[in-house]
Amino acid sequence: MRHPELAAGEIAADAVTADLRTSGNALSFWRCGSPGEAEVERIALAMAAAGDRIDRLDLVWISEEHLAADGQTWEGTAGHTPIVESRSLHVDVLRLDYVRLGSVAHRVADAIANGRCVRFTRTRVRELLVAAVTRGDVAIADLADRVRDEVGAALQAF
């Protein structure tokens, strides 16, 4: 979203504080072999299945080479998702400070500016979850209450 009060290339503070929330000076990422549709949907599903509610998802992709060039370090960590086969795709970028987080924010802004992003609408996220439950990729019981209720209602509508 453009902010008229900011010059080109400037990053809104709200984007950093709301969208790039850290925990323990680390930031959660998911590996995506290639930014093809199936791979990106796989990551969107892993994230959506872990949520407390169904909401839209905005995904951007940043290469590990860019992170390394910025001096970032990361390690694989088990992803918090009921999609078991996707857990190993999770990584945490570690030892973030003000400068390193700013570098990540610039990489995210660059990815968005260059079309390395995709938005999954709330409807599309629900469709992904319904399809995953139908295929048996995730048990509906493993979803959070609000997600389970909405997915269950969508399944009954079929």
Image: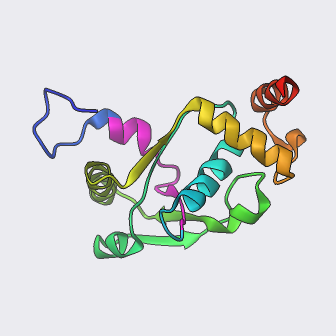
Q: Is residue 147 left or right of residue 44?
A: right
| Between 49 and 132, the one nearer to me in the picture | 132
Does the rendering let one see residue 117? yes
Q: In the image, residue 51 lies at what x, y percent?
A: 67, 39
| Between 117 and 36, the one nearer to me in the picture | 36
Report the quarter where the N terminus lies: top left
Magenta residues (range): 15-32
Residue 85 position by quadrant: bottom right
| Between 150 and 99, the one nearer to me in the picture | 150
Q: In the image, residue 6 lies at what x, y percent?
A: 14, 33
Picture layout, residue 134 above or below residue 73: above
Residue at image coords 68%, 68%: 88
Q: From this viewpoint, which residue is outermost toward the front?
A: 158
- Magenta stretch: includes residue 142: no
Report the quarter where the C terminus lies: top right
Residue at image coords 60%, 55%: 43
Q: In the image, residue 31 lies at what x, y percent?
A: 54, 66
Residue at image coords 78%, 60%: 84
